[in-house]
Amino acid sequence: MTPRIYYLSLEFYMGRTLQNTMVNLGLQNACDEAIYQLGLDLEELEEIEEDAGLGNGGLGRLAACFLDSMATLGLAAYGYGIRYEFGIFNQKIVDGWQVEEADDWLRYGNPWEKARPEYMLPVHFYGRVEHTPEGVKWIDTQVVLAMPYDTPVPGYKNNTVNTMRLWSAKAPNDFNLQEFNMGDYIEAVLDRNLAENISRVLYPNDNFFEGKELRLKQEYFVVAATLQDIIRRFKSSKFGCRDPVRTCFETFPDKVAIQLNDTHPALSIPELMRILVDVEKVDWDKAWEITKRTCAYTNHTVLPEALERWPVSMFEKLLPRHLEIIYALNQMHLDRVAALYPGDIDRLRRMSVIEEGDCKRINMAHLCVIGSHAVNGVARIHSDIVKNSVFKDFYELEPEKFQNKTNGITPRRWLLLCNPGLADIIAEKIGESFITDLSQLKKLLEFIDNETFIRDVAKVKQENKLKFATYLEEQYKVKINPMSMFDVQVKRIHEYKRQLLNCLHAITLYNRIRCNPSKSFVPRTIMIGGKAAPGYHMAKMIIKLITSIGEVINNDPYVGDKLKVIFLENYRVSLAEKVIPAADLSQQISTAGTEASGTGNMKFMVNGALTIGTMDGANVEMAEEAGEENLFIFGMRVEDVEALDRKGYNAREYYESLPELRQAIDQISSGFFSPRDPGCFKDVVNMLMYHDRFKVFADYEAYIKCQGQVDQLFMDPREWTRKVIRNIACSGKFSSDRTITEYAREIWGVEPSATLQLYYRHRPSAPGKSLP
């Protein structure tokens, strides 16, 4: 029997479920008709559902796409995470600034989940460790209960329904009513909140580590509950060897695969060791063997500020036994390194799981690498950086561990559901099997010169643009020109993603129009959307700058319909489903070597937008698939960035030598875009001029020139649409079905042959042996 796959993630950015369920069950037309018969509009109904916003961005949305693909491929897979009471905050724009409000998504209940109190499990914190002749005991702990809630994950028309199990924290009934609190019953009951706060709220940071104790508690909470569940299921299944005393764990790695989505669930490694050694009395070396063969780790970022480095002092207090285990594992690891590289003290320091310094810290990425049998990056260029710089020493030690698994997106949500018009005209030409085999889109290359198809593709895009323009007018009272180029950058606001480069282009375009109002311009609507982490000052300033630029440009009579700058408020999954099918141009402009993969880039590609981007993340492979000449690639490559680092990046050189850049910066600096507060953007300008890690000015000239080429092509609608068709036809690689097939074969040791899976999974089993 093939192993069960456990995908552990602190984020699952699911969005809405109703339409996705109808699509995957093949019920959309039937429901549409039935609702219509009742005098209702299905789309209106769909708009009432809250997004399940249990994620920040790419990492959380990737987990959601993976669940869809694993179910569609018939894998026996489970998603495990936390049922946050409050997901990613709702973003309001007030006076041009971001204001956060709590996302009370469960206010009216959640019809898709089923509480499973019968599988509630205890999770332990604090306490102390006792070493006894009978073994190690972790005692005097505080207990929090983990209550599971199950959400069904249907595959696409294949009679498979998998489970996403999210844990909610509950205080035990005797919480704080033990010896020390007998006097104050009311206080004790109120203190139950302290335990239950563990699953209260999602930490809203994307690509940034904030070492808070509550976050470490969340990470251990999901891991401890999940591992108990995994082991219970392993023991009760018909393939545990029928040892009368206890299950033998020899076969565990053949039956269980655990995938760690970034380092957030890294505690799985010491926790599995703790259970095997302390509880199940497995020999230490055997336990380590089992643990490594079971776990695999996906790295999602190379930014140093994003790496999890927990203070040892926090561990000592919260998870004393896990700290002991980590020390022992590290010692074993360093002994091996020392034996292979005698006298290389610096290498030992670099490779240690424990970082020495004023504050000793645990490097969770190093823990993941030593405790996993496979480590993967999420796009080829990222995996190369992982091997050649981030984990260079580890790669030299065990090169066979390191793999690439280029990210993908589910074509069910990101084509069928969000762009039915496009899906229809594709199906008309090549049939429907592309929905579960996206590589079949290659067949569209035959129609690249087919005038009817060219016209149909252009027509669908125009309809999507009109629909989105209507939505914008209804929701936000903004009028846009639907004939303009929809130039879109939607993603979390971060310096490395360089929304500021986009701003500089907008200002440059504005200045050119002002300078020459009678000249004919290609009309553009620049749309930028995304949330800033509440504590990220620069990201919040970037939002204020975008809204301020919009204020000036959108109200300048000289500009009229030629240029608009719109900030898309509260960007989330359900808004992505509306804006992406309407986009003409997709902006993927991070500094080369900083965006691990990107997945929005893939969504735009499959939905018929052209990409302007750097050679970063999956853009590299998109250009490889479609041909570099069919994307608008500009700017420094990774090698150029490295060379510039060696030389020393001096922003002032660019400022002095590029008059249009200087004018734009001077306008921001002088208060042209903030007349009521002229010094408003001094921090932004100061950063760009004196400590810009992401080298915005270095790519400015190439970017502006490349945007000129975009304008040129847009003026020839037929040629533009032919490029669009070529992009769609070459987007097949970027299906998460392909990604998951590679994980299954090369990491989990499973062959995703749906028919075989279905035979095994729907066989009648012995009574009482059905597994939750």
Image (cartoon, rainbow, N blue to C red):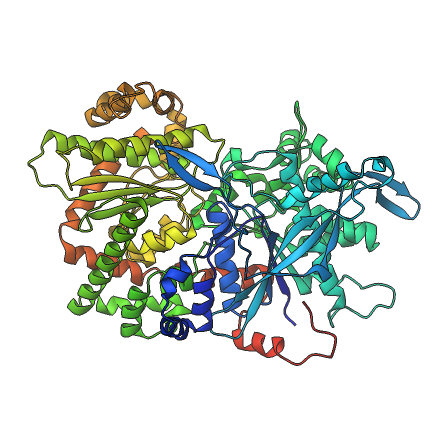
In the shown orientation, is residue 124 left or right of residue 520? right
As drawn, the residue found furthest toward the bottom would be: 764
In the shown orientation, is residue 646 left or right of residue 342? left
Quarter of the C terminus within the rendering = bottom right
Q: Which residue is drawn at 41% across and 60% down?
A: 46
Give above or below for 319 relative to 2: above
Whether residue 591 is visible, yes or no, is no
As drawn, the residue found furthest toward the left would be: 518
| Residue nearest the viewer, comparing 405 with 165 | 165
Q: Where is residue 738 in the image (x, y as percent from the top left)?
A: 45, 63
Q: Position of residue 374 (x, y in %)?
A: 59, 53
Q: Where is residue 613 in the image (x, y as percent from the top left)?
A: 31, 44
The total number of labels drawn is 0
Give above or below for 505 relative to 378: above
Give above or below for 363 relative to 737: above
As drawn, the residue found furthest toward the right would be: 133
| Residue nearest the viewer, comparing 137 with 676 | 676
Q: Which residue is drawn at 66% across and 22% down?
A: 358
Q: Which residue is drawn at 34% across and 54% down?
A: 578
Whether residue 43 is visible, yes or no, is yes
Image quarter for residue 638?
Answer: top left
Q: Where is residue 163 in the image (x, y as percent from the top left)?
A: 59, 63
| Residue nearest the viewer, comparing 155 with 39 | 39
Quarter of the N terminus within the rendering = bottom right
